[in-house]
Amino acid sequence: MTQRSENAPEAAVIAEAAEATEVVAAAVPGEAAAPDTFVDFRDAAFTYDGERFVFRDLNLTVPQGQFLCLLGGNGSGKSTLAKHINALLVPDEGAVEVFGCDTRDAESTYFIRSNAGLVFQNPDDQIVASLIENDVAFGPENLGVPNPELRERVTRALAEVGLQGFEKHETNALSGGQKQRVAIAGVLAMDPAILILDEATAMLDPRGRAGLLRVVRELHAAGMTVVMITHYMEEAAQAERVVVLDGGRVVLDGAPEDVLVRADELRALSLEVPFACRLSLALRAAGVPVAPCIADDDLKEELCALRSSR
Amino acid sequence: MRLAFEQVSYSYAGAASRKKKAGKKEKRQADWGNAPGEVWALRNVSLTVEPGEFLGVAGHTGSGKSTLIQHMNGLVHPTEGRVTADGADLVDKDVAVSVRQRVGLVFQYPENQLFANTVYDDVAYGPRNMKLPEDEVDRRVREALLLVGLDADEIGERSPFDLSGGQQRRVAFAGVLAMEPEVLVLDEPVAGLDPLSRADFLALIASFHASGMTVVMVSHSMEDLAALADRILVLSEGRVFALGTPAEVFADAAALKAVGLAAPAPQTFASALREAGFPLPRALYDEATLAADIAAALGCGDGAASAPDGGGGRG
C-alpha cells in the first residue's frame, strides 16, 4: 500500500482513499495486529523536549468502526495521542501503526494523513476560505481531486454535517457550531476512514455541541471510525468505548456504563462523572436502592418503578 | 461601583455610520456599507449591576452577551441609550479611562493574549501602564499572582508560553487582578478547562466575590451560574429575556429551552420527576437537596434529615 501511494499519481491515490476502508482491511501485513485494527499504539513513547515523556509504554488499539471517546485531565496526553493518529507526531520509542502503516515511515505519511481526518478545538483556526464551498474543497483540491468529483464531494460532505445548500455562504457569518461543522465537512470531503475530534466541542454553546455530536453519531452509524477527545461526560456517555488517560497511561478502558460510574477513580483523575451517576450515588448514600447509571432516563425510570412499588 | 445600562441598543451598522461621520477611510466605509441591513446586537437593554453582587449572564451564541460586557468598561459605546458608572456616562472619554482601571475585563481564552517575555512582565503590564511607581507595581504583581495560586519568585522569570494551559490562564487572570479592579467581568472563564481546573477556577472566582468584588460572569454552564450567581441575566437576540435569582430564572425550563438554553441538570431532572408524580417542593434544586427530597418522597432512610439546609438549595 505504501508502495502504491508513493509512486501513483495523486488522483489515483484519492480513488484508493475513497475505498480506504476495504483497501486497508485487505492490505494489512500478516505480522501486524488483527486486520480490522485501524490504530495500534505498541509500547509507544513520546517526548517533546527529550526529558519528560508525555506517554510511555502506551498500548492502545482502535478497531475499524469503533466510536471511542478519550478522556483525561489537562496534560494527560490526549492531544499528543491524537496527533500521532495522523502522523503529525511520531513516537520516539515503540511504534504507532495506522491502517497497518508505521507512522514513522515517511512514505506512508501522505496515505495516513489523507485518511485520518483531524478536527481541532478552535473553529476560527480551521477555516481557510471565505466561501463555504471553497473551504470544504480546500483539502480534496490539494489532494488533486478533479472537478466533477470535487463538487460531488463538497455537496456530500456538507449534507453529512447538515449544511446542504450552504455552498455559497460566507464562512465569517457562521456561528461557532456551524464553523466547526464546516471544518468537519472539510475533513469529510477528503474521504477519511477515521475521524479524530480533539475537543472539537469545547468552544461551542450547548446547542452547537448537541448539533455536532448528532453529526458525529450519524457518521459513526454510517460506518465511520471515530476518536473523540472531550471533557464533557455527557458526550462520553454516548460513545461505544471510553478510554481514560492519566500521565500518558491508559488507566480506565471499557464501555461508558462501566467506566463513567467509577466516581472515586474519575475524580482522582481530575474528571467528573455524569449528572445521573452523581445523583444515583447521592441517592444510594441517602438509602435509595438505585443502581449507578449514566443516563437521566434510566435513573428516572428506576425511581418511578421504585415509587410505584411502594 | 454601580454600573447602569439605560435603554441600551447597539448596532454594528450604527457603529459604522458613526465611524463614517468621524471621517474614517472611505474604503472602510464601503466595506461597512455592505453589511446586510441593521443588525442589532443589543436591543433596549436596561439593568443595573449592583456593587458587590455576582451577576451571571447566560444566552446562546449570538444573543449579545459579549457585546453587553464590552459596554461595561467603555470598549464599545451604545448606539442608543447610555451606560453609566456611578452616574457618569461612559461615552465621556475621561470617565471611560478611569472606569477601565476599575472594571477588569477577562476575555474568553485570555491566555491567547499573553505577550511578554516573562510572567512577571506580563502581569506588570497593566500597573506599569497606569504609571504606578515600581515598588507598587511589584507589590501588585506579587499579590495578583498569589491570588491565583502562583508564586512570583518561583514562576515570575519564566516565559508564560512554557506554562500549562491552566497556568497560562491563571497568569492572564493575574494581569487583570493587578489592576485591582472593583468589578471583575469574565467571559466564559472556565471554557476549555478540565473538570478539576474548572472547579479550582470557580472556587477562585467565588473567593474574589466573597472578598467584596463585584463579579459579572458569562457562562454556558447553568450549573455554575446556579451555584454562584446572586442574579442571572438571560439574553436572547439582544433582549433581556429574564433577570432574577437562579430560582426565578430556572423555574420555567420550557421557556429557557425556547431560547436555546437548558436549566441546570438537577432542576431539569426534578421537573421530570415532578411530572411523574414526585412531590418536590423546592424552587431550586442542586444534587444534594434533590437526592434528599427524592429519598424522602420514597420514604427511604433518613433522607430528609440529611438535607444540608431547609432553604433555597444553595447550602
Image (cartoon, coloured by chain):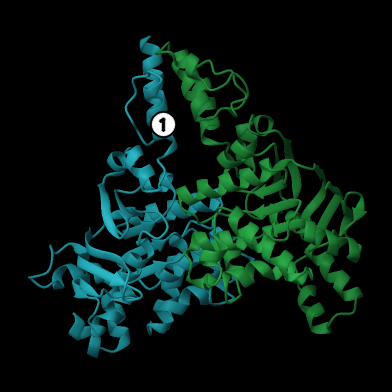
Chain colours: A cyan, B green
Chain that bears disc 1: A
Q: Quadrant of residue B20?
A: bottom right
For mark 1, give the secondary structure: helix
Above or below, A137 against B274 in this view is below
The residue at the point 58 percent across, 71 percent down is: A168
Above or below, A195 against B146 in this view is below
On the image, numbered disc 1 is attached to which residue?
Answer: A297
Left or right of A174, for residue A142: left
Q: Give the residue furthest to the front.
A: B135
The residue at the point 29 percent across, 48 percent down is: A240
Q: Return the x and y of residue B128 as percentages of the image width and height.
A: 74, 71
Q: Nearer the viewer, residue B34 or B189?
A: B189
Left or right of B80, for residue A169: left
Q: Nearer the viewer, residue A170 or B279?
A: B279
Location of the C terminus of chain A by quadrant is: top left
- Residue type marked 1: Asp
Q: Return the x and y of residue B157 as percentages of the image width and height.
A: 54, 72
Q: Return the x and y of residue A53 as percentages of the image width and height.
A: 30, 68
Left or right of A267, for residue B245: right
Residue B177 visible somewhere in the drawing: yes
The residue at the point 35 percent across, 38 percent down is: A263
